[in-house]
Amino acid sequence: MPSPMGKPKFDIGRIVQQKLDYIWQNTSFTVHQKRMLQAIADCRTPALGAHKIACTDCGNIQIAYNSCRNRNCPKCQSRDREKWIRARESELLPVTYFHVVFTLPQALNPLCRSDPKLLYNCLFRSAWYTIQKLGKDQRWLGAQMGMTAVLHTWGSNLSLHPHVHCIVPGGGITENGCWKNSQSDGRYLFNRAVMGLVFRAKFVKELRKLLKSNQIPKHLAPQSLFKQLFKHQWITYAKRPFGSPSAVVEYLGRYSHKVAITNYRITNVSQNTVSFRYKDYRKKGKQKIMKLCKEEFIRRFTMHIVPHRFVRIRHYGILANRNKKEQLKIIREDLDVDHTTIIKCEASKILNELELLAWCKCCKRITVQLIIDILPPVRGSPQLTLFSDKNNG
């Protein structure tokens, strides 16, 4: 679904397309990363086929090229994001929600680049362990909590910055099936310093297990690394609680299917360079422009391609997929609330299989488009089609 901002001036897919030879020849990229980059380059081009569409408002006919549907593609997230949000709305509770961010220190970046799947799994486990342990502690809450966590691996300037954004209901369910609010009466979740200590201890323990089982190279995790990890306090950022369940939905929409950089942040593309906007958080989030050569831009972007078959959105505790239906039912009964009244969202228009939402060049806005013809893909060279991947990354 196109953005209401209109079509961006520059496209990451075209930048990648111009450097395909560099990508295939670069041995530092994995096969999976090359396949994902090829899919992004092919997105909404004749390589994936197209369909003729007619605007139901003005009748204008145009060609709409098919999407790659890759979860790493900046142009293919809107529809999946909306579907995911609609599914999450039914899970909201009439309680305070907190936003917590668990971040890995820069000292672990070499390990993250070496085996991202292992390290990011440790990050998820350590984040949930921290929330679960403090939640079950009678000094803090004494109940089973829940959490939805989303992995982000980038900083605003496309540097490697692994962290998980977590949505945590401010309370939990006790052993006798009753809902118990956090002791702070909604002002904060847990002490940030305590969360940082528990998070660091758990992650280092997980790291030592991986090292002992030879799952990570010993030269990347020397004893000096562990000393460095304990030298500084780990960042566990806890934002102020959300104002309402609708604010939670708005947040989920902004973070759930986000990619490292969008086309709208790119300000200029020359023959050899790419310029884009970023926030300098060392200077209170001041907007700046970064200029990189195209090869470096692609290298940074590739660092944030999700590992093969990696689950980057996870649910835990009372929100875990295996038991959340039963748990949420018990909580709602205890709170005496009808889940249909928790949040009121405008119902999306239901489209049939021959309709879609797209930007109309004539109306200058997003309208319902009727599909009137299907155009087959244009075959490319054997080198390009060999690595094409039209499925989700």
Image (spheres, rainbow, N blue to C red):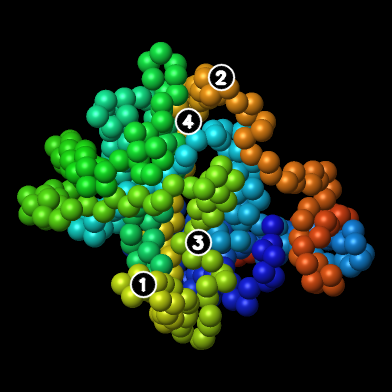
User: Circle 4 sits in a helix, a strand or a loop, which is it?
Assistant: loop
Q: Is residue 221 left or right of residue 349?
A: left
Observer-nearest of 44 and 175: 175
Res. 303 image quadrant: bottom left
The tag on residue 215 is none
Which callout, 4 or 3, points at the residue further toward the start of the chain? Answer: 3
Residue position for label 3: 37
Q: Depth-wise, is mark 4 or mark 2 nearer the camera?
A: 2
x then y, percent, for residue 67: 66, 57
Q: What separation in Å lies between label 1 and label 2 (alpha carbons)?
A: 45 Å
In primary-sequence order, the first of circles 2 and 3 is: 3
Residue in view at x 67 percent, y 69 percent: 5
Vertical order, 154 against 169 (above or below):
below
* Residue 333 - label: 2
* Amino acid type, callout 3: Leu
Distance from disc 1 to disc 3, alpha carbons, whole Å, reads 33 Å
Instruction: Answer yes or no: is residue 287 visible.
Output: yes
Q: Residue at x 41, y 40 (%)?
A: 186
**Of helix, strand and loop, which one carries label 2?**
helix
121 vs 393, left or right, is: left
Total labels: the figure holds 4
Instruction: Give the residue pinned by disc 1.
Output: 284
Pointer 2 local density, CA inside 10 Å: few below 14, some 14–19, many at least 20: some
Q: Pinpoint residue 316: horizontal percent, then vertical percent.
A: 42, 32
Marked residue nearer the N-terminal end (4 or 1): 1
- The amino acid sitting under disc 2 is Glu
Q: Residue 185: x percent and y percent? A: 39, 37
Q: Quadrant of residue 107?
A: bottom left
Front-lying residue, 330 or 75: 330
Instruction: Using the image, tell me which numbered label, if any, was put on residue 319.
Output: 4
Residue contact at pointers 4 and 3, CB within 8 angstroms = no
Q: State how far apart marks 4 and 3 are (Cα).
A: 33 Å
